[in-house]
Image: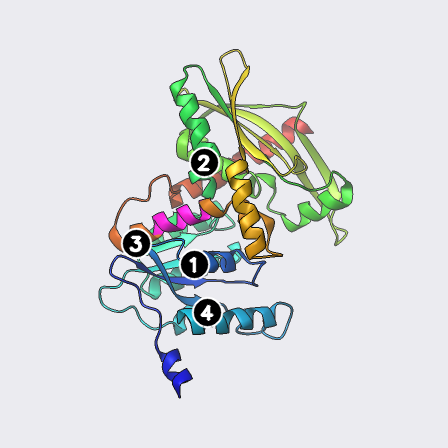
């Protein structure tokens, strides 16, 4: 039948495109993987051709559960309109054709990443895009780094704040003005009460620094030479920072920071500050102060341009996760640079490497007990 003929034709990349396997799509409107798919199918990333989607849950045990019907609808549309091939596991994906450059975009649960990295290498991928933080622990990331290096495979990290406009503008302003000090401010919109924060602490049990503030730690590692070995001093702002022990929905207690502020000085003479607040609101920003501590520059995310884009996207995908929209241009930029690296070998500028991911997690593991002690 015509339908069968149509189905045997699978999407194929053009010579200057990477053939992308998306590993972990998740539920439409909810899963980050789904949003990656939507961006690629909409040709937002010209160097990326989405050819395969691997989704173990919704093509398996989750098919008849919550989100199963929505996924099935997305699947049949992607098959019909874009000839995307859907598979339950990476092992089922057809082998890579001669001359084709294959990229795996892994967007599943962090704990599955070490296994999925190995399966992606076996499936012939030469570049692998990993969502932050890459793996639950430094040790696992180090093993993954070796495994990829042995196979001559490159790993890029989805730390999208590395390419964010507000970060770039603050860095450029500070570079042009002697004596400048940069503070990266990250905010979330949790309600400032025990039940809201307790739920947050339990769901993000790896802790604030490995979760919410890991993006900022990646910025420190990428642009300020911050590594555990290069830290000269850490100054914790005790008046701002706060640590609480709260019960999560399960009744189990969790101790975490609801807000932190600290300044790191490196042995190589750089200094930078980070401020993160679970209940700080919907706007994050980068701020530059002069030698006397007066604020001289600030760029927010979302800014007016972002807000206009958010309105367009809200109308296009009603009910999707709000953070997809505010960070939409940055997700596109990261994917495009990684896909271009895979397709042409062009360097992926400012994109975090596995070394940056390792440094960021190491910094988180170093800072957490140090700050807990200061805030007891």
Q: Is the residue under label 4 in contact with that under label 3 (CB below 8 Å)?
A: no
Secondary structure category for the residue under label 3? helix
Nearest to viewer (mark 2 / mark 3): 2
* Label drawn at residue 165: 2
Q: CA distance from mark 2 to mark 3?
A: 24 Å
Asked whether 337 falls inside the magenta stretch, the response is yes
Residue topped by disc 1: 42
User: Of callouts 1 and 3, which one flags the residue occurring earlier in the amino acid sequence?
Assistant: 1
The foreground one among 232 and 189 is 189
The residue labelled by disc 4 is: 78
Q: Earlier in the sequence, mark 4 or mark 2?
A: 4
State the residue position of label 3: 342
Callout 2: few (<14), some (14-19), or many (20+) C-alpha neighbours within 10 Å?
some
Residue 53 magenta-highlighted: no
Q: Position of residue 129 (x, y in %)?
A: 40, 53
Structural distance between the alpha carbons of marks 3 and 4: 23 Å
């Amino acid at each position: 039948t015509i339908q069968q003929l149509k189905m045997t034709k699978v999407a194929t990349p053009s010579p200057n495109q990477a053939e992308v396997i998306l590993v972990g799509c998740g539920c439409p409107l909810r899963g980050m993987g789904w949003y990656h798919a939507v961006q690629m199918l909409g040709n937002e990333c010209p160097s990326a051709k989405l050819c395969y989607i691997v989704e173990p849950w919704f093509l398996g045990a989750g098919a008849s559960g919550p989100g199963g019907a929505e996924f099935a609808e997305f699947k049949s549309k992607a098959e019909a309109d874009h000839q995307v091939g859907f598979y339950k596991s990476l092992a089922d994906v057809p082998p890579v054709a001669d001359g084709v450059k294959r990229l795996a975009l892994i967007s599943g649960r962090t704990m599955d990443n070490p296994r999925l990295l190995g399966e992606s290498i076996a499936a012939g991928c030469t570049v692998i895009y990993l969502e932050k933080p890459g793996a639950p622990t430094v040790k696992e990331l180090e093993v993954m780094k070796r495994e990829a290096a042995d196979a001559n495979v490159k790993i890029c990290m989805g730390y999208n704040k590395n390419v964010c406009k507000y970060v770039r503008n603050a860095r450029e302003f500070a570079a042009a003005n002697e004596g400048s000090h940069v503070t990266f401010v990250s905010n979330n919109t949790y309600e400032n009460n025990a039940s809201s924060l307790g739920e947050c602490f339990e769901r993000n049990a790896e802790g604030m620094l490995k979760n919410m503030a890991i993006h900022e730690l990646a910025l420190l590692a990428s642009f300020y030479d911050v590594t555990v070995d290069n830290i000269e001093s850490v100054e914790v702002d005790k008046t701002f920072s706060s640590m609480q022990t709260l019960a999560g929905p399960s009744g189990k207690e969790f101790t975490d920071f609801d807000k932190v502020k600290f300044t790191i000085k490196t042995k190589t003479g750089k200094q930078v500050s980070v401020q993160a607040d679970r209940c700080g609101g919907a706007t994050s920003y980068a701020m530059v102060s002069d030698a006397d501590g007066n604020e001289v520059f600030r760029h927010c995310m979302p800014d007016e341009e972002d807000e206009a884009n958010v309105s367009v996207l809200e109308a296009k995908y009603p009910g999707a996760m709000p953070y997809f929209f505010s960070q939409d241009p940055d997700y596109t930029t990261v994917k495009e640079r990684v896909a271009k690296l895979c397709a042409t070998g062009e360097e992926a500028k400012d994109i975090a490497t596995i070394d940056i991911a390792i440094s960021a997690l190491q910094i988180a593991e170093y800072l957490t007990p140090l700050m807990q002690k200061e805030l007891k």
